[in-house]
Image: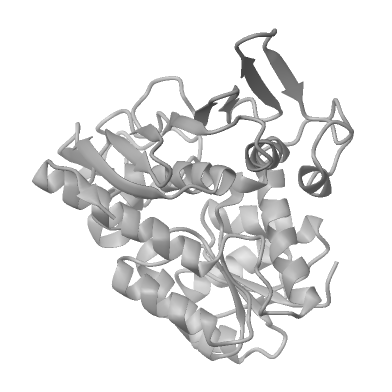
Amino acid sequence: MHEIGVAVTGTGFMGPTHIEALRRLGIPVVGVMGSSPAKSAAFAERMNIPSAYADFDELLADPAVQAVHLTTPNRWHFETAKAALLAGKHVLCEKPLAMNSQESAELTELAASVNLAAGVNYNYRFYPICLDARERVRRGDLGDIYSIVGGYVQDWLLYPTDYNWRVLASEGGKLRAVADIGTHWLDLVQSITGLEVESLCADLYTVHTSRQRPTGEVETFSGKVQAVDATETIPIDTEDLGGVLLRFSNGARGQLWVSQMTAGRKNRLSFEIGGAEQALWFDGENPNELWIGQRSQPNGFLIKDPGLLGETARSYTAYLGGHAEGYPDSFKMCFKAFYDYIAAGDFAAPPFFPTFADGHREIVLCEAILKSHEEQRWIKL
């Protein structure tokens, strides 16, 4: 697709996902860095990647690398994103952009000062159906927006024996379910409607205040049966689930529910946007359908078909009607927007991909949610 070499940091769940999407776009992955030189080498051999880096300095020194994808645990994002931008590399970072808003503000300011692309992987924006919903809302089909409700629920941390680095505040931050999945929902509904959250009130809950750490780390969404013989009991102070009441910039009301402990829900992001004329409902476990609600005529379903989608959604749709597109395709299309922007070469132009500024906004929201929960009151942004 483009003559650009990409290096990927991280060899867990997200690293291979990024690599697959890049390769489907025809963008060469020239190197990889894991948590140790041995992991880097083994992963590079398994994935047929030319270079395995011992550390991040070696990665940045490689002239074949023009862009870096960061898929490591959250605590490494600020340091590596900053170093990569200062080294003249384009950066695509997994969310969250950093561990706090001071770090994300610094990264946003740095990104604005260089002629480089700096993005955060809020990939759910790029489901064709979500892009079509954005076009419908932005052209006024729904009329004035009154309500935005929904949630993001999973079950992979349902049991106290379920463990992953994400449950540790030292690795992922003080918020977990909200920061890990709730931010995807917040970014998506704001990008669709063009509205911003102005104030909020949160109530969060840690069900399992301790968990059993099994021998070795457990991959996120690995689908593997986790180890039964735990080596130690560890305290947990990140939230398992919770709700957030929202007020948007136009006066609309909203509600977000997040849970990583809802049995049977594997990865369900859903939203319902209610307006004066129409409503839209989307279920991320069926991402090729959009429900369109109406008062005075029959409701309808839009099934993903490029011939029926709006112009923008059509440009990010790879397959014909009747051919489903899903989670891996959302990465591919997010990266397409990112690398098309680089190829165009106008870094003063407004980008269509999620930016460091978007990533900073999500961290500001997370900090407000945490403050609201701790103080049990509404917080104005």
**Point 12% across, 41% down: residue:** 376
Q: Is residue 20 left or right of residue 198?
A: right
Residue at the far left in the pictured view: 375
Residue 47 image-quadrant placement = bottom right
In the drawing, does residue 174 fall left or right of residue 42?
Answer: left
Question: What residue is at 61 percent from the left and 17 percent from the top?
Answer: 293
Measured as percent of width and height from the top left, residue 370 is found at 21, 50
Name the image quarter holding the C terminus.
Answer: bottom left
> What x and y, as percent, mark residue 281?
57, 24
Q: Can residue 195 be seen from the camera position used here?
A: yes
Depth order, front residue of 47/295: 295
Name the residue nearer the viewer: 253 or 67.
253
Query: Is residue 168 left or right of 345 when viewed as pictured?
Result: left
Q: Is residue 185 above or below residue 148?
A: below
Name the residue rendered at 38%, 48% in the picture. Answer: 197
Residue 364: quarter of image: bottom left
Image spot of residue 124 (x, y percent):
59, 44
- Report which quarter residue 246 is drawn in: top left
Q: Residue at x 48, y 85 (%)?
A: 83
Q: Is residue 20 above or below residue 262?
A: below
Whether residue 267 can be seen here: no
How far across and down, in percent of the image, does residue 308 sit? 84, 31
